[in-house]
Image: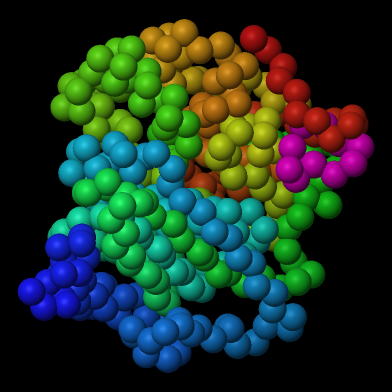
């Protein structure tokens, strides 16, 4: 047996890896922008900074999509979680006022087919193209022994840029500012460990069955793509005092991260209707309201903090991007805490 045959017998097929790299190269090439530099397939990805900036500051973030990949794996869908990864990352730097310029992915697994790997990168590339962002490179690692055959995980690193003196940190937030909630497209990429337990173990549902209240299958409800808010907020970014991406930790765990000393965020829990997906999860899982708030986004994927005079223009920009918004509370004097008003 040749050395290549021995490696394949151990779980790593180099011929299949080369075919996957060729497919990935085509997808990566389709995302190149005017800021792209270097060659596709090089050891490192290169991207230029936009011209004309006074004091460009890089904003970087690394994240994954959690156990949502297990739902995608069971459903045989791979591109949606790739797009999730990009949109989640875009939102994480967007809250600092940064515009994305480059992305890199990392896919690790065992026994993945060329079609599976290409599907993941296809979704990542689609997300990059939607934001005029270069997929500057990445890594695909076959690791039998660490991963069960056919399983995988993926993560990504995003690079964005903002003028240093225009970056949002929450320091401009003052009592009297309002909270504007932006509609989520579902669970986004958080709370799946609990959601999977409720849906598959307690409700005993299959992927093709209808999830009560949602009007769609379990697979469609759980794999709805994480929404990007870039087109909703960038047109009015200069009018915002702060933003919180509502991910793991829910509204309280994320909104508190941008509150300056002396400011409380008071969230009116009656200001928006809990989407049926979350209502079903709470009822079927017998989850307390407090835990729901700590785990899920509850239909609010982003919260902007802004002066009252900016609310109308911010809502108009979101509406033009197809995203619903609601005033969900206000900033009051306090001790940098998040409090809920209402039931």
- The location of residue 117, given as percent across then percent down, is 24, 61
Q: Is residue 236 visible?
A: no
Q: Which colour scheme appears in the figure?
A: rainbow
Q: Position of residue 265 (x, y in %)?
A: 77, 31
Q: Is residue 236 above or below residue 1?
A: above
Residue shown at the point (25%, 14%) measured from the top left: 204
Q: Residue at x 59, y 23 (%)?
A: 293
From the viewer's side, name the closer residue of 67 and 57: 67
Residue 292, placed above or below residue 91: above
Question: Residue at the spot x=52%, y=29% of the render?
Answer: 296
The answer to which quarter of the image holds residue 43 is bottom left
Up/down of 28 relative to 303, above or below: below
The residue nearer to you, when weighing 241 against 39, is 39
Question: In terms of depth relative to the viewer, which is nearer, 307 or 183?
Answer: 183
Horizontal side of 21 relative to 342 (left or right) equals: left
For residue 41, side relative to residue 271 (left or right):
left
Question: Over which residues does the magenta segment extend?
Answer: 256-265
Q: Is residue 6 visible?
A: yes
The quadrant of the image that shows the C terminus is: top right
The quadrant of the picture occupied by the N terminus is: bottom left
- Residue 298, magenta (yes or no): no
Quarter of image, res 66: top left
């Amino acid at each position: 047996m040749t050395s290549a045959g021995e490696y394949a017998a151990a779980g790593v097929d180099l011929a299949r890896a080369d075919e996957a790299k060729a497919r990935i190269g085509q997808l990566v090439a389709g995302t190149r922008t005017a800021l792209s530099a270097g060659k596709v397939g090089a050891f490192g990805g290169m991207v230029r900074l936009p011209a004309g900036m006074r004091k460009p500051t890089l904003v970087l973030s690394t994240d994954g999509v959690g156990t949502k990949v297990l739902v995608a794996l069971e459903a045989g869908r791979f591109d949606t979680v790739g797009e999730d990864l990009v949109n989640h990352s875009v939102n994480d730097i967007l809250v600092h006022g940064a515009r994305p310029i480059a992305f890199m992915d990392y896919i690790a697994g065992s026994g993945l087919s060329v079609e599976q790997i290409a599907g993941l990168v296809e979704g990542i590339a689609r997300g990059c193209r939607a934001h005029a962002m270069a997929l500057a490179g990445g890594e695909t690692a076959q690791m039998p022994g660490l991963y069960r055959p056919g399983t995988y995980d993926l993560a990504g690193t995003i690079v964005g840029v903002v003028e240093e003196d225009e970056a949002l940190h929450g320091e401009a937030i003052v009592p009297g500012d309002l909270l504007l909630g932006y509609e989520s497209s579902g669970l986004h990429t958080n709370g799946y460990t609990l959601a999977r337990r409720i849906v598959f173990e307690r409700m005993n549902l299959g992927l093709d069955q209808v999830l009560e209240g949602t009007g769609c299958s379990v697979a469609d409800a759980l794999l709805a793509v994480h929404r990007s808010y870039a087109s909703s907020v960038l047109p009015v970014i200069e009018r915002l005092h702060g933003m919180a991406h509502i991910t793991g930790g829910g509204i309280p765990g994320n909104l508190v991260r941008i509150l300056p000393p002396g400011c409380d965020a008071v969230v009116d829990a009656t200001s928006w209707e809990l989407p049926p997906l979350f209502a079903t999860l709470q009822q079927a899982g017998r989850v307390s309201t407090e835990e729901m708030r700590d785990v899920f986004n509850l239909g609010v994927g982003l919260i902007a903090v802004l002066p009252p005079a900016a609310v109308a223009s911010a809502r108009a920009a979101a509406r033009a991007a197809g995203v619903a918004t609601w005033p969900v509370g206000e900033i009051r004097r306090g001790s940098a805490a998040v409090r809920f008003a209402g039931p």
